[in-house]
Image (cartoon, rainbow, N blue to C red):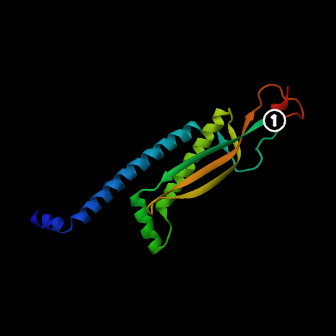
C-alpha cells in the first residue's frame, strides 16, 4: 500500500488524468449505447417510411404531392475517441472511433428526415442525398454535422385535375 501511495505522490497529475480518461471513456460508452438504443427503437417505429436514393419513385402510376424533407444532426466526439483517433492516424489504418460517430449521425439524420415526412403524411422518400461537414472546435476536438434530405411523396388530397398541379387547382 505504501508503494502505491508513493507512486501516486510522485505523479499525481498523471493519475488524475488517467482517472478522468477512464471516467470519460465509461460515460462516453454509456451515452453512445443509450443513443443507439434510442435510434433502434425509432427505426422500428418509422420502418414503414421507405427511403430510396433513386431519382424516380418505384411506382409511378399514382400522382403524388412532392415535399422537400430534411433531417440534420450535429454530434460531437469525446476526448477518448479523439485520443484513439489520434493514435490511429499516427499508426495508420481505419478510424473506427469516427466511423461509429458518422454512423450515429447518419442514422439520426435519416430518422429526423423520416419524421418530417410523416408530418407531411408521406410514406415514401426518394432522391435522398447526404451532406457532411466537420465542425471545428476551439480545441483540437470537434463535431460532425450531417444533413439528409430528399423528396417526400404523399398521396394527393382532394380531386386531381389532369395536367394541373394540385396547388393551383381550384
Residue 143, horizontal then vertical, whole percent: 50, 56
Q: Examine the rendered structure and indicate whether residue 127 appears above or below residue 134.
A: above
Q: With 148 as the anchor, is 166 left or right in this view?
A: right
Q: Which residue is rendered at x = 21% and y = 64% of the image?
A: 12
Is 156 or 46 nearer to us in this picture? 156
Give the labeled residue for mark 1.
Answer: 63
Q: Examine the rendered structure and indicate whether residue 90 appears above or below residue 161.
A: below
Residue 159, horizontal then vertical, whole percent: 83, 25
Q: Which residue is rendered at x = 55% and y = 46% of the image?
A: 108
Quadrant assignment for the N terminus: bottom left
Is 93 or 58 nearer to us in this picture? 93
Q: Which residue is rendered at x = 81% and y = 32% of the image?
A: 167
Q: Quadrant of residue 69?
A: top right
Is 31 or 143 nearer to us in this picture? 143
Q: Quadrant of residue 65?
A: top right
How many marks can you see?
A: 1
Quadrant assignment for the C terminus: top right
Q: With 128 as the anchor, is 11 left or right in this view?
A: left
Q: Which residue is rendered at x = 58% and y = 43% of the image?
A: 111
Q: With 46 as the anchor, is 20 left or right in this view?
A: left
Residue lying farthest right? 163
Amino acid at each position: 500500500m505504501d508503494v502505491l501511495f508513493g507512486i501516486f505522490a510522485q505523479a499525481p497529475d498523471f493519475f488524475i488524468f488517467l482517472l478522468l480518461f477512464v471516467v470519460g471513456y465509461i460515460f462516453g460508452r454509456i451515452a453512445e449505447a443509450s443513443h443507439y438504443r434510442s435510434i433502434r427503437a425509432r427505426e422500428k417505429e418509422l420502418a414503414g417510411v421507405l427511403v430510396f436514393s433513386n431519382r424516380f419513385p418505384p411506382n409511378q402510376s399514382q400522382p403524388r404531392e412532392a415535399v422537400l424533407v430534411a433531417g440534420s444532426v450535429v454530434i460531437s466526439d469525446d476526448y477518448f475517441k479523439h485520443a484513439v483517433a489520434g493514435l490511429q492516424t499516427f499508426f495508420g489504418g481505419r478510424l473506427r472511433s469516427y466511423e461509429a460517430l458518422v454512423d450515429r449521425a447518419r442514422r439520426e439524420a435519416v430518422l429526423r428526415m423520416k419524421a418530417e415526412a410523416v408530418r407531411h403524411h408521406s410514406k415514401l422518400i426518394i432522391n435522398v442525398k447526404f451532406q457532411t461537414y466537420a465542425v471545428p472546435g476551439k480545441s483540437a476536438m470537434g463535431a460532425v454535422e450531417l444533413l439528409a434530405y430528399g423528396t417526400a411523396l404523399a398521396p394527393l388530397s382532394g380531386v386531381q385535375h389532369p395536367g394541373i398541379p394540385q396547388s393551383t387547382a381550384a
